[in-house]
Image: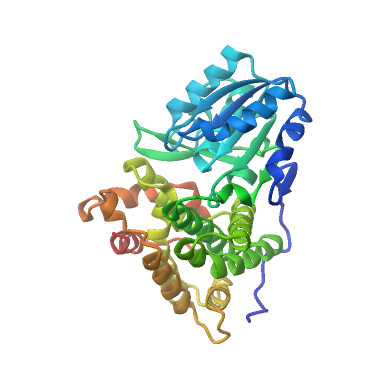
Amino acid sequence: MVTNVSASSSFEFATATRVLFGPGRLAEAPEALRGLGGSRVLLVTGANPTRARPLQEALERLGLGVTVFSVDGEPTVERAREGTARIKEAGCDAVVALGGGSALDAGKAIAALAANGGDPLDYLEVIGRGQPLTRPSLPFMAIPTTAGTGSEVTRNAVLGSKDAKVKASLRGPHMLPRVALVDPDLLTGAPAAVLASSGMDALSQLIEPLLSARANPLTDALAREGLRRSARSLRRAVLDGADAPTREDLALASLFGGLCLANAGLGAVHGFAAPVGGMFDAPHGAVCAALLPAVLDVNLRALRARAPEHPSLPRARELAVLLTGREDARGEDAVAWVDELRVALGVPGLGRYGLTEAQVPALVAKAKGASSMKANPLVLTDAELAEIASRSL
């Protein structure tokens, strides 16, 4: 195993005020939410709000008023506006989101906007005015039902814009959830395609922070442990079914990925994923999976050619060892391992969602401005970015 990989000794680490993890802990959500001090709750769910009905009933038994707001598909600027208006109409003073990353990001955005006022475009990066969110969000609890985004412990919310055809983030330290409740039992019965897409998203959110220009010793430790768990359980969970041990591994890998990305940044995979998600109706995790092999390969070649002393080079070999379990693994073995996993899990290329070779230049232009690109190990050329997009078709 590679052991002499350095990381910054000066860093900040921020996360949710309280993290509850373990099978069956969903039962603790009502009391934990009541402890935040709210009396009327906006319950943000995915497309099927019936899944949140037991939680809604438990909250109501405690005397809390509940207004349900469902998010069909990935969250948008428009839905964030609608959710903020719903909070005002109902007089809600707390938010809980139960669902996948879309529901969690929507809830996080609504809690922030309700407290700060104004429009999402006042605060959005890239396509908005980028003003800071200066007031603490309404008390917010995040309960993931998939194992991919790690949104329960991040300080941003990704919103799509139909007008700009891109995704961008609301971001700020006040957006961290007050409570993150992660119950691996909520993965029971998840479709294989959801486990594959979300699991590959989590994998990318462990890999990119490990190689990030902003990596630090704490995120390194979490990334390493998360990668071990993902490597041993993701394929098995998708192809053979997710039993209790694999559900726990996937939930922890996702949680650790969220902790890592929030504190060490991401890279070119997510730099491309933001505009792709805005241009096409494509699952975020599947987009990341399609991009990950080419990004790893192009980064590896660029580092060797232009920055042979860069600390991310030995980290690429460490990544290969963690994924393959072979002490003699090299960076190229990580690329091959990830690509083979993507194929085995049936995750398609970006062409499946409508991206064509003719659209690659426009995609590259948008990806260059994405905030995630700032943490890539080094700045990639337009030709290298175009190669990534073309190879990911």
Q: In the visual, does 11 lie left or right of 123? A: right
- Measuring from the top left, give residue 136's x and y in whole percent: 69, 29
- Measuring from the top left, give residue 150's x and y in whole percent: 58, 49
> Which one is in front, 377 or 318?
318
Q: Quadrant of residue 33?
A: top right
> Which one is in front, 27 or 101?
27
164 relative to 384, above or below: above
Residue occupying the point 59% across, 28% down: 43
- Measuring from the top left, give residue 331's x and y in whole percent: 48, 77
Residue 58 can be seen in this image: yes
Residue 130 can be seen in this image: no
251 relative to 377, above or below: above
195 relative to 207, above or below: above
Quarter holding the C terminus is bottom left
Q: Quadrant of residue 227?
A: bottom right
30 relative to 249, above or below: above
Q: Quadrant of residue 72?
A: top left
Q: In the visual, does 257 lie left or right of 307? A: right
- Measuring from the top left, give residue 48's x and y in whole percent: 47, 33
Tally the marks: 0
Q: How is the image coloured?
A: rainbow
Residue occupying the point 42% across, 59% down: 289
Q: In the visual, does 313 lie left or right of 167? A: right
Farthest residue toward the bottom?
328
Quarter holding the N terminus is bottom right
Residue occupying the point 75% across, 43% down: 18
> Which one is in front, 167 or 142?
142
Farthest residue toward the left?
358
